[in-house]
Amino acid sequence: MVVASDTEVVLYEKRDGKAYITLNRPKALNAYNMAMRDALLQVLGAVRDDPDVRVAVLRGAGDRAFCAGADLTEFLTAPSPTLARKARWDRDVWGLFLSIEKPMITALHGYVLGSGVEMALCCDIRVAAEDAQLGLPETGLGIIPAAGGSQTLPRAVGLGVSLDMLLTGRWLSARDALRARLVDRLAPPAELWSAVDRMADRIASLPATALASAKQAVVRGLDLSLAEGLELEARLARRLVGL
Ligand code: COA
């Protein structure tokens, strides 16, 4: 369990080339609110710009949840859900997330709902504790995912599972999420942090420019035709060896 400070909604620590970003509203199951959005913009900017950071880890404080989705109390106190949502769109945290060229790992435990799933999808490698439960409750609330989820989810799991989750509101257990490729690895809950930390150590030991190029080739390549993707790969490969 991550030790939580009561005052900051997102904690940021740096150690040995690794940046740890911790969603820190454990009493509200780390629900994503506007204060968290503002804090995330700052820390993601730091991950992007700080040359000492070679890999970032995103996780949630407390033992119950990575993130239980958008803060429903903000939805309820705003003049309308639409305005609550617009306020969050005014600053493009998701665009920033997806623009980061460094490897990002996420450690998922407990409830991973709504924007929790979407944040996880902005990361490159998702490791889930065996107790994690993943779901997208948005349609049940009369809205749709809008932190990129309707686009990033099918890129990860394909059409069938995406539509099953969105149209039926079905939650996936960690094991089903692994089978569906929504998560990449599982760990026993007590070993989640150490498993992710070992992975981050390994990544931090590899050449940063090669990692950034590999990430770019794969992620950008997914949206290109094969011919364009091969051109991108050739360009990135040449650049790495100074040609
Ligand atoms: N926004 C704001 N607060 C939230 C929250 C959210 N999305 N999810 C949980 N919380 C708060 C609860 O209000 C509660 O606060 P309280 O102790 O002050 O009453 C606390 O977190 C614990 O949640 P609780 O509902 O008591 O836990 P539970 O184990 O009974 O249920 C969930 C857990 C995740 C099933 C339930 O909290 C839930 O359905 N949350 C909403 C999920 C959702 O729809 N997210 C929005 C997606 S767009």
Image: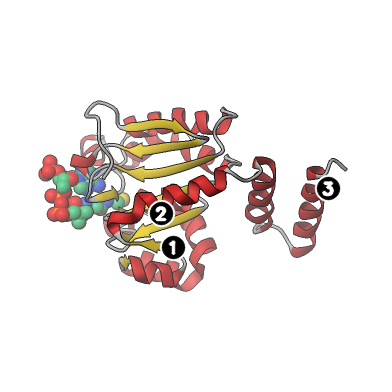
Circle 1: element type: strand
Of the numbered discs 2 and 1, the one sitting upstream in the chain is 1
Give the labeled residue for mark 3.
238
The answer to whether one can see residue 142 in this image is no
Q: Residues within 10 Å of mark 3 (few under 14, many from 20)?
A: few
Cβ atoms under marks 2 and 1 closer than 8 Å:
yes
Q: CA distance from mark 2 to mark 3?
A: 34 Å
What's the mark number on residue 195? 2
Of the numbered discs 1 and 3, the one sitting upstream in the chain is 1
Above or below: residue 137 compared with residue 197: below
Q: Amino acid at mark 1?
A: Arg
- Look at 22% across and 49% down and name the residue there: 63
Q: Amino acid at mark 2?
A: Ala
In the image, the residue with mark 2 has its CB under 8 Å from the nearest atom of ligand 1: no
What's the mark number on residue 185? 1
| Left or right: residue 211 compared with residue 95 | right
